[in-house]
Amino acid sequence: MRHSFSLRLGILLFTMAVLLKGKAVHGQEVNSPPLPAVKHLIDTHIHLFDPRRPEGIPWPPTDDKVLYKPHLPAEFSRLAKPAGVSGVVIVEASDRLEDNEWVLNQVKGDPFYVALVGNIDPYRKDFVEQLKRLKRDKRFVGIRARNSGPIDYTDPQVLENFRRLAKAGLSLDILANGKGIEGVREVDVLAGQVPELRIVVDHVLGYDIDGNPPSKEWLDAVKSLSRHENVSCKVSGLYQRCTQQPAPHDPDHYRTVLDPLWASFGPDRLIYGSNWPCTKKSGDYDSFVRLVNAYFAEKGQEACEKYFWKNAATAYNLPLR
């Protein structure tokens, strides 16, 4: 009997070792940083969509084998809640006006989904009317600047609509991916022209993370942008902004971009967001939360509280205390 117990124990220990080894190689979960211990944990950047809809979806493309499938609230809730997430801000992934209502309907009655950053084409003649209509739903907290083509942030009509957005107490998200230094400078000019507008620049200002120190030009552009108190930066989408794919899970790989963002924006204007489901291409949801927590935990408890929820509450006017 003792021999049988020893054999079973040996098999159990061997199995655990194999499982742990596999996780260390693929998910880097072994000896990973802890999950954040904060009052609230608000993910300010996820997307919901369903390609099975009769009218289809404009994004992601049909040949994306990871993303081109339903990504709906039940799946995200199942993944995020065990990682400590207590509330969610959805960011519209579609440039179709009607899809604002579609997303809001998907989370109707679910308090876990606290807000939507929607979409209204800033070139629309009826921008203000659409804004008033969507604002009737208290979960509608702003828009992400996008349409089917590039947006000229110096266009008088666009600027006037952004001023109306600010007057309505709503915010503006900007996706600067692929624009590099010019994208940062573009937001810099806009922030100066509409200083009353709360602006959130997504995904570490669209920086391409390769593990090397940023150029002086980029650092100077970031420092200039951070002078505008109305601008915040989402430390989000780190996996997707990596030039290496699948992206590394080592927190040190991201310091070359996180350190200058911290130096410029400080503890009060950096905001958490995952960019789920795009995170699936490099790891599970839990791994991303641990990754960013490894960096911000070094800054102290108050820095974590600000990054994971307080700054989001300010940027999106969320009812969090």
Image (cartoon, rainbow, N blue to C red):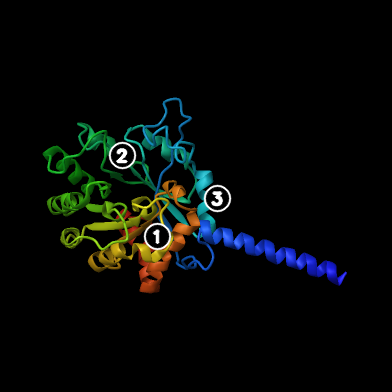
Query: Where 186 sits versus 272, above or below?
Result: above
Tell me the kind of residue under disc 2: Asn
Residue 78, disc:
3
In percent of width and height, residue 183 lies at 20, 49
| Foreground tag (3 vs 1) | 3
Task: Point out the tag, 3 or 1, that comes first from the N-terminus.
Answer: 3
Instruction: From the viewer's perspective, tell me whether residue 211 is left or right of residue 14.
Output: left
Please tell me whether mark 2 sits on a helix, a strand or a loop: loop
Q: Nearer the viewer, residue 61 or 91?
A: 61
Q: Earlier in the sequence, mark 2 or mark 1?
A: 2
Judge left or right: residue 5 versus residue 28: right
**How far across and how far down the image is residue 64, in percent?**
43, 37
Residue shown at the point (50%, 61%) measured from the top left: 28
Q: Label 3 crowding class (10 Å Cα cut-off): few <14, some 14-19, many 20+?
A: few
Lower sequence index among marks 2 and 3: 3
Q: Identity of the amino acid at label 1?
A: Leu
Q: Position of residue 83 (x, y in %)?
A: 51, 59
